[in-house]
Image: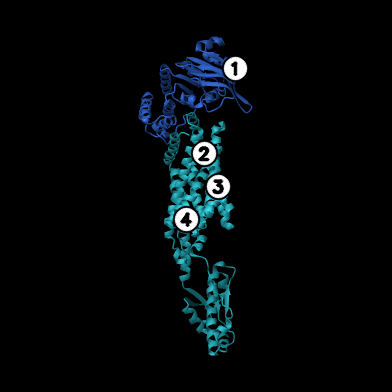
Chain colours: A cyan, B blue
């Protein structure tokens, strides 16, 4: 292979396509920034709303509040306000005007004073998911009150309150802040690979189907350049564009994670620059793979439009294993390393979790993806040696 | 010098070229004439090495296009049917790309491009992107690109297609200039007047076979017609000469 001619082809494809606004926007902006921005906005919104909900004081509608002043005091002390319930509380809950209404019947005070179980009623509509949180708060407040009264009564009778708590449940959460972050970051590998694919998309079409449609392929093939050199120069340019898009995506993610108020909900989203760099490196072979895949498919199509249609479909194929792992989470296994895109997905997820990468996994992933990439490159060279490439 | 001998090419069941032989000598303009679908383009595409011959041989300055493709390519300049310029590159960049692909670089390439820009009168639009070029400008740049590596043999596939009268005349003058400089020019056309006005030798092709060859006068004599167009129609067979 003539190195100078290889660089000539590579350089021409890169410069030529950098002048195309659509390609440029896709490689530098849409492809790499869509994921991080979408993710940041979504996460910030979700987290802020959760935090706001927790802090918000809730107004509980009560019917017959005058029968239970002690309970009302307790509720007020626990960051809730009390308001009088409407005349027909059932209708108000049924229509969704109120999430829940606490009804204190007239006999409550007498039963309470006599030390008998004093009944209160919670009117609720369990079929409404949005009401669940407020129902829980109302029930929790009443139960907490009941428990504290019970403790006082037992103490008054000289009984150790612990006697009525034979078993205590303690919640021991073993998830590290990072592993909780994985739930949030589950879509991140998807966005990274998507950026790599979009980066390659237009150049893969332009340098194959586009070249033929413009009528520039035929004269190009009359130059004294081996077809393998042509194909390698083109594929290298596509790979570069894909890698640039991926790099910007990772850099943007690194920057965007600081904008997410994750600490408010006790999550450490902490991708270190070192981990980001490793992420980029383990994904690089994927750039070659996707460049080969898209170029080979585009070489079969007859026009730019047809190539776009096909590639829009083909570009989803590498994302199938990624979606699969989101829907059916599995433990990382060595066989996953043999599948391009799935292997990168698993490795990126490990990195986000803050786990150490298994060297065997990395080697298998890089090797299998490169083999697939070189295989596709070979296929592209073979396609370009056939007469049918002229269409 | 381009020598085609007993060339054959099939596409599936279609026999596009069936035993075509001719030679286009240096310092002469050879016209390949025939109705649409006669096999002209296929023949030229085999000569320009993008298609492989089914049988027979093509030699360019002695180099066989199949066995010694790169040497043949270095001796050939090809102006394809469509100009095939890169719209986002300037005229100069389009020409430079082909120069580098054909192994010229640095000062030598710069000088060569300057020569061609002058010869083909490209200067005015040399540094504009090819996107907005007129058909005539495109043809000039594509021709400069085909000649950047100084090939002795030029293959032009219907070069005057889509050109206006002035541009056509300018191109003819240019092609004669190239002939006088000793180039072998092989070009195809389906327009009789075009070939009659320009060519030293004519090869008429129909149904993938050669039906006549010679100077314009010899062709007229061969058909027994004084009008070249009548001769063409008669030689090609009426059903294809519409």
Question: Which label number is shown at residue B214?
Answer: none
Per the model, the C-alpha gap separating discs 4 and 1 is 69 Å
Quadrant containing the C terminus of chain A in the rendered view: top right
Separation (CA) of disc 3 from disc 2: 31 Å
Which chain letter matches label 1? B
In the displayed structure image, the side of residue A122 where residue B163 appears, left or right: left
Circles 3 and 2: CB atoms closer than 8 Å: no
The kind of secondary structure element at disc 2 is helix
Label 1 and label 2: CA atoms lie apart by 40 Å
| Chain for numbered disc 4 | A
Q: Residue at x 56, y 46 (%)?
A: A313
Q: Nearer the viewer, mark 1 or mark 2?
A: 2
A117 up-or-down from A184: above or below: below
> How far apart in space, not on screen, are marks 4 and 3 (Cα)?
31 Å
Within 10 Å of disc 4 (Cα), the crowding (few <14, some 14-19, many 20+) is: few
Q: Residue at x 41, y 35 (%)?
A: B89
Circle 3 or circle 2, nearest the eye: 3
Q: Is residue A137 visible?
A: yes
Which residue is denoted by mark 2 in the rendering?
A304
Between discs 3 and 2, the one toward the N terminus: 2
Give the residue pinned by disc 4. A38
User: Which residue position is annotated with label 1?
Assistant: B237
Q: Is residue A370 above or below residue A126?
A: above
Q: Count the numbered circles shown.
A: 4
| Rendered position, A253 above or below B232 | below
Q: Chain of mark 3?
A: A
Q: Secondary structure at mark 4?
A: helix
- Residue denoted by label 3: A368
């Amino acid at each position: 292979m003539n190195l100078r001619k290889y660089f000539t082809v590579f350089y021409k494809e890169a410069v030529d396509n950098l002048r195309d606004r659509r390609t440029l926007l896709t490689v530098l902006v849409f492809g790499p920034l869509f994921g991080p921005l979408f993710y940041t906005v979504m996460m910030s919104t979700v987290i802020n709303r959760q935090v706001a909900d927790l802090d918000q004081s809730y107004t509980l509608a009560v019917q017959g509040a005058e029968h239970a002043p002690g309970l009302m005091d307790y509720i007020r002390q626990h960051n809730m306000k009390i308001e009088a319930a409407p005349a027909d509380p059932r209708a108000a809950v049924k229509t969704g005007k109120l999430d829940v209404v606490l009804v204190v019947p007239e006999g409550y005070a007498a039963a309470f004073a006599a030390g008998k179980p004093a009944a209160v009623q919670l009117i609720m509509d369990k079929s409404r998911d949005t009401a669940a949180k407020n129902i829980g708060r109302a029930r929790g407040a009443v139960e907490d009150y009941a428990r504290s009264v019970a403790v006082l009564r037992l103490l008054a009778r000289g009984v150790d309150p612990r006697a009525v708590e034979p078993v205590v449940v303690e919640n021991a959460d073993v998830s590290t802040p990072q592993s909780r972050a994985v739930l949030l970051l589950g879509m991140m590998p998807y966005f990274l690979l998507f950026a790599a694919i979009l980066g390659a998309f237009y150049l893969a079409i332009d340098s194959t189907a586009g070249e033929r449609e413009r009528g520039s392929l035929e004269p190009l093939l009359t130059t004294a350049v081996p077809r393998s050199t042509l194909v390698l120069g083109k594929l290298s340019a596509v790979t570069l564009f894909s890698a640039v898009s991926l790099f910007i995506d990772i850099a943007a993610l690194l920057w965007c994670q600081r904008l997410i108020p994750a600490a408010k909900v006790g999550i450490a989203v902490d991708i270190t620059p070192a981990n980001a760099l490793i992420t980029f490196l383990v994904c690089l072979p994927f750039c070659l793979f996707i460049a080969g895949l898209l170029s080979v498919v585009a070489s079969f199509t007859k026009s730019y439009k047809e190539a776009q249609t096909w590639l829009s479909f083909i570009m989803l194929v590498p994302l199938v294993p990624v979606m699969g792992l989101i829907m059916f989470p599995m433990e990382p296994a060595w066989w996953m390393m043999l599948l391009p895109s799935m292997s990168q997905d698993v490795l990126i997820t490990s990195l986000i979790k803050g786990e150490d990468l298994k060297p065997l996994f990395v080697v298998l992933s890089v090797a299998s993806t490169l083999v697939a990439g070189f295989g596709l490159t070979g296929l592209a060279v073979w396609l370009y040696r056939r007469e049918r490439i002229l269409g | 010098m381009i020598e085609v001998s007993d060339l054959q090419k099939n596409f599936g069941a279609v026999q596009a070229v069936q035993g075509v032989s001719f030679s286009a000598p240096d310092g002469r303009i050879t016209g390949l004439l025939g109705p649409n679908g006669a096999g002209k383009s296929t023949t030229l595409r085999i000569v320009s090495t993008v298609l492989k011959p089914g049988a027979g041989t093509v030699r360019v300055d002695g180099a066989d296009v199949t066995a010694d493709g790169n040497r043949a390519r270095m001796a050939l300049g090809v102006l394809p049917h469509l100009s095939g310029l890169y719209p986002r590159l300037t005229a100069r960049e389009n020409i430079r790309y082909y120069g580098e692909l054909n192994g010229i670089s640095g000062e030598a390439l710069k000088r060569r491009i300057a020569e061609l820009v002058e010869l083909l009168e490209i200067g005015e639009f040399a540094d504009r992107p090819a996107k907005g070029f007129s058909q005539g400008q495109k043809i000039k740049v594509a021709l400069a690109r085909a000649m950047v590596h100084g090939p002795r043999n030029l293959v032009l596939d219907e070069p005057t297609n889509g050109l206006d009268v002035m541009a056509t005349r300018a191109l003819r003058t240019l092609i004669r200039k190239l002939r006088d400089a000793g180039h072998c020019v092989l070009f195809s056309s389906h327009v009789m007047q075009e070939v009659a006005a320009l060519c030293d030798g004519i090869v008429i092709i129909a149904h993938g076979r050669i039906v006549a060859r010679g100077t314009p006068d010899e062709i007229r004599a061969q058909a027994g017609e004084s009008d070249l167009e009548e001769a063409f129609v008669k030689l090609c067979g009426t059903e294809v000469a519409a």
